[in-house]
Image (cartoon, helix red, strand yellow):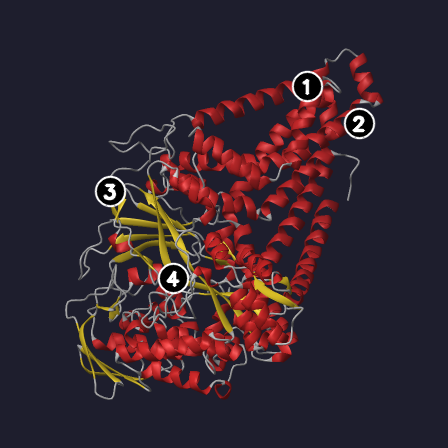
């Protein structure tokens, strides 16, 4: 019961947070000393007062700021994120198109990162200061330090251009004549359409960008797993379990990991959040039409409704995943009660 | 857990390797006749009926000509829609399209067009004169970016189903060229009006047809749209009922390629057929690639220095002698090297492909002694300090900030100590439009490719106002501007235009630095790659050999 109350409290807080974000973004974005009318109309059309006035009237930019915010907030409470100045489409529709590709990529990346990261972390922690440990720590440091866009270009050059092992930028090969479906998740749409070739092709296109993005998160997960597990392994109850005759593998998998899990879950969750926020440089290199690209185009285009929409989305994602992490804590750790 | 983790990792590796197996990119069965992938970069989809893939910075977000102003809209819109007149490869002269012929009445204000009778829109509706009137009236009343081209159009009449009479408010020698631009695309009026389109003055606030038109283009052009994702990709398919010569390509995919390095790799591997976003720095890699053809094509994009007429903003730069000194100080050869092979400097603000082009400023125009002398005469024997503002733009692949650095180096040679101030592009435009920039570096891409578009730089015109240049400051230039606009006799226009350019170049507020070339790179099994500065590329001539 208290979990339910806790959840309700958190969700209410989320709603308040989102309103706060909308207010902050609304005003910060208007601090830029440039008029979107001029940005969109271009220098020639901006010289025509009638056209500028028409633009400002169309987008409600001629009203006083508090009125503009009030109009925006009331639409927001009805679930309407406004219309993008750049695309002319409802912002919600734009997000429904650009968010799934980012989710797809983020899920694949975090899976790779989590599996490899935890595995490496466990190996490192159970063999501290051996050669294996040094190598894996080196890999994790490089994963965190190497710029993702550089890594992306190198991977593309090696695995796509030289070796032809993996496909190039994009979500799917144009020759397949398949450009997705209703959900905008290429994998799901391919399954729905029964198009096995498209499914395999989309999966192969996910590997390189997934690896590139996964490298960074993997580094963090490895380090966190290693230090957390080492902490736990030094505790009394582990020594007791070993002295009772359990093998090291049984101790690690049965007793240690679950106690070491909390920080790892945090890092995996936050890593996932970062990926969902959109990684513009990797998206650029791999032609991935995700949130990063949308956010960049909206920001540089002074597209107020779109900028606010993206900010709200990312805030909701962060808050939501934090909530999931907190619930997981309670699930795995009996000491945590809300 | 360790054992399980290791098993999991092993399984993941096996899975990855299994997915990799098969060599060729794209899991589709290789079309007959495709060579297996090898280090030379054999192309997939080399079968003659494979779609042609074109890569560029795809910024198109709408398929409604009434709302299209992005750079590559002029690549797509002319392929989906037709105009009264259109451009054709290798010619700057507007060619008959929906209009088979036209006449201009004696007062040079009335244009009468005869329409084709065999044109059918995608919806099946036949083209009549009311479609032309609806499209032009709607464009005018929408009051969007492109509506400025209709400011000179006073009325559009339709005496019968196949005749259109356009009346201008003042003679305009560039009107027929303007007609070839996407602004004047002819839409299926019945379909658009039935879905929220308006051609009355209420269009500015009440026209709601954009979403419909983007989802169902109301055109009659050589291509139809199979799918369109804004800023991502458009898939064009040949229009089987097109009235004109059918496009050789059955299917063309125009894809967003925002990174030039990735695009280069895809071009070399054969996953991209035509790349329009290559930069001059990639030229060595491009020319060294097997199976890739590289062309340097001229564009009408120019970069220039802006020098405000108002001393309050420009300081010493408002002085014509200082400006003449700057013109002598610039090292034009370095600029050409930066911009790439094929770059040159027009003498004034008119590009080489326009009627009335004055000619080049010779690359050896640079004369530091003369520059210093002029500067001393103006009262600055020791030079002065000034800020050079530049927006974070690129002109055909060349960064303006790099260009600004060259300018600063050149000015330092004569004692002018310039500091670069890089402004975010929207802020730069804002300042520019407010007329507050004293000394700045800009680029310009014409809205329509005709001499008259360049007159925006003249006193009291759009850009002239942004440097606070009024007609009374330069009465002869203002007079010549009107003469060039209204004179329909080409030979006489050229005379006026040349005098105009001489006057502007001599201490005026603009100094043209460079006319930029563009790189077009494509696979050697693609033919008829016809570039054009208005339409970028004629998609309706692309052929896979």
Q: Residue at x 20, y 74 (%)?
A: B128
Question: Which residue is labeled 2 in the image?
Answer: A231
Spatial CA distance of label 3 from label 2 is 63 Å
Specify which label sits upstream in the sequence, 4 or 3.
3
The reply to whether residue A81 is visible in this rendering is: no
Spatial CA distance of label 4 from label 2 is 60 Å
Question: Which residue is labeled 4 in the image?
Answer: B73
Point out which mark residue A132 bears: 1
Residue closer to the observer: B49 or B537: B537
- Quarter of the figure with the C terminus of chain A: top right
Residue closer to the observer: B417 or B249: B417
Q: Residue at x 67, y 60 (%)?
A: A21
Question: Which residue is labeled 3 in the image?
Answer: B49
User: Residue A149, relative to residue B491: is it above or below?
Assistant: above
Q: Position of residue A91 (x, y in %)?
A: 52, 61
Between marks 4 and 1 in the image, the one whose residue lies nearer the viewer = 4
What element does badge 3 sit on? loop
Callouts 2 and 1 in the same chain: yes
Q: Quadrant of residue A309?
A: bottom right
Letter of the chain that mark 3 sits on in the rendering: B
What element does badge 1 sit on? helix
């Amino acid at each position: 019961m208290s979990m339910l109350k806790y959840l309700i409290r958190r969700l209410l807080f989320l709603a308040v947070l989102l309103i706060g974000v909308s207010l902050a973004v609304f005003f910060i974005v208007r601090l830029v000393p440039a008029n979107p009318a001029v940005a969109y109309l271009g220098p020639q059309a901006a010289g025509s007062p009638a056209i500028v006035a028409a633009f400002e009237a169309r987008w409600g930019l001629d009203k006083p700021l508090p009125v503009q915010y009030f109009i925006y907030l009331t639409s927001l409470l009805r679930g309407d994120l406004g219309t993008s100045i750049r695309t002319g489409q409802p912002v919600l529709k734009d997000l429904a198109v650009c968010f799934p590709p980012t989710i797809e990529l983020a899920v694949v990346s975090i899976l790779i990162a989590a599996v490899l990261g935890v595995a490496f972390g466990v190996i490192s922690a159970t063999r501290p200061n051996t050669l294996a440990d040094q190598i894996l720590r080196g890999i994790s440091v490089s994963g965190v330090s190497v710029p993702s866009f550089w890594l992306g270009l190198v991977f593309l050059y090696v695995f796509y251009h030289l070796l032809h092992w993996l496909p190039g930028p994009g979500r799917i090969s144009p020759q397949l004549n398949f450009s997705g479906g209703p959900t905008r998740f290429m994998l799901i749409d391919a399954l729905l359409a029964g198009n096995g070739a498209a499914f395999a092709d989309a999966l192969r296109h996910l590997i390189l960008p997934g690896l590139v993005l996964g490298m960074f998160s993997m580094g963090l997960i490895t380090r966190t797993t290693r230090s957390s597990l080492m902490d736990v392994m030094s505790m009394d109850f582990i020594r007791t379990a070993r002295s009772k005759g359990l093998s090291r593998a049984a101790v690690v998998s049965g007793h240690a990991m679950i106690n070491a899990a909390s920080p790892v879950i945090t890092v995996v969750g936050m890593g996932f959040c970062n990926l969902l926020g959109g990684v513009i440089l990797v998206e650029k290199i791999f032609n991935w039409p995700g949130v990063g690209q949308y956010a960049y185009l909206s920001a540089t285009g002074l597209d107020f409704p779109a900028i606010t929409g993206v900010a709200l989305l990312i805030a909701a994602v962060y808050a939501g995943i934090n909530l999931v992490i907190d619930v997981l804590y309670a699930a795995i750790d009996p000491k945590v009660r809300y | 857990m360790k054992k399980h983790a290791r098993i999991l990792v092993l399984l993941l590796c096996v899975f990855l390797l299994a997915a990799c197996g098969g060599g060729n990119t794209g899991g589709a069965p290789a079309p007959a006749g495709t060579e297996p992938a090898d280090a030379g970069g054999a192309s997939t989809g080399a079968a003659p009926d494979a779609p042609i893939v074109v890569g560029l910075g795809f910024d198109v977000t709408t398929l409604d000509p009434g709302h299209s102003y992005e750079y590559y809209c002029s690549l797509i819109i002319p392929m989906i829609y037709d105009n009264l007149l259109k451009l054709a490869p290798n010619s700057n002269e507007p060619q008959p399209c929906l209009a088979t012929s036209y006449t201009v009445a004696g007062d040079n204000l009335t244009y009468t067009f005869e329409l084709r009778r065999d044109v059918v829109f995608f919806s099946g509706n036949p083209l009549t004169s009311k479609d032309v009137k609806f499209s032009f009236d709607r464009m005018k009343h929408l009051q969007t970016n492109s509506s400025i081209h209709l400011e000179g159009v006073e009325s559009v009449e339709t005496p019968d189903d196949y005749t259109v009479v356009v009346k201008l408010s003042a003679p305009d020698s560039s009107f027929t060229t303007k007609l070839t631009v996407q602004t004047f695309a002819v839409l299926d009026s019945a379909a658009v009006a039935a879905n929220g389109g308006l051609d009355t003055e209420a269009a500015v606030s009440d026209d709601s047809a954009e979403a419909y038109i983007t989802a169902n283009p109301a055109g009659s052009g050589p291509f139809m749209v199979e799918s369109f994702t804004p800023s991502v990709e458009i898939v064009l398919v040949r229009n089987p009922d097109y009235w004109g010569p059918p496009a050789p390509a059955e299917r063309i995919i125009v894809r967003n390629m925002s990174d030039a390095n990735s695009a280069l790799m895809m071009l070399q591997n054969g996953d991209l057929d035509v790349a329009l976003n290559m930069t001059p720095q990639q030229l060595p890699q491009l020319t060294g690639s097997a199976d890739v053809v590289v062309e340097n094509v001229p564009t009408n994009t120019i970069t220039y220095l802006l020098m405000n007429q108002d001393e309050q903003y420009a300081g010493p730069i408002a002085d014509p002698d200082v400006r003449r000194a700057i013109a002598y100080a610039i090292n034009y050869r370095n600029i050409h090297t930066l911009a790439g092979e094929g770059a040159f400097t027009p003498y004034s603000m008119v590009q080489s492909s326009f009627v009335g082009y004055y000619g080049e400023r010779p690359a050896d125009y640079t004369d530091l002694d003369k520059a210093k002398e002029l500067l001393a005469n103006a009262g600055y024997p020791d030079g002065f300090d000034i800020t050079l503002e530049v927006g974070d733009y690129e002109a055909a692949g060349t960064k303006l900030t790099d260009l600004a650095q060259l300018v600063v180096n050149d000015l330092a040679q004569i004692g002018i100590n310039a500091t670069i101030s890089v402004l975010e592009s929207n802020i730069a435009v804002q300042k520019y439009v407010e007329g507050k920039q004293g000394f700045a570096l800009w680029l310009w891409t014409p809205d329509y490719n005709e001499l008259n578009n360049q007159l925006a730089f003249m006193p009291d015109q759009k850009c002239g106002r942004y440097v606070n240049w009024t007609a009374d400051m330069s009465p002869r230039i203002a007079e010549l501007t009107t003469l060039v606009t209204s004179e329909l006799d080409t030979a006489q226009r050229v005379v006026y235009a040349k005098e105009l350019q001489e006057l502007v170049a001599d201490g005026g507020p603009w100094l043209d630095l460079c006319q930029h070339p563009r790189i077009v790179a494509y696979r050697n099994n693609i033919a008829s790659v016809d570039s054009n500065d208005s339409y970028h590329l004629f998609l309706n001539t692309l052929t896979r050999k």
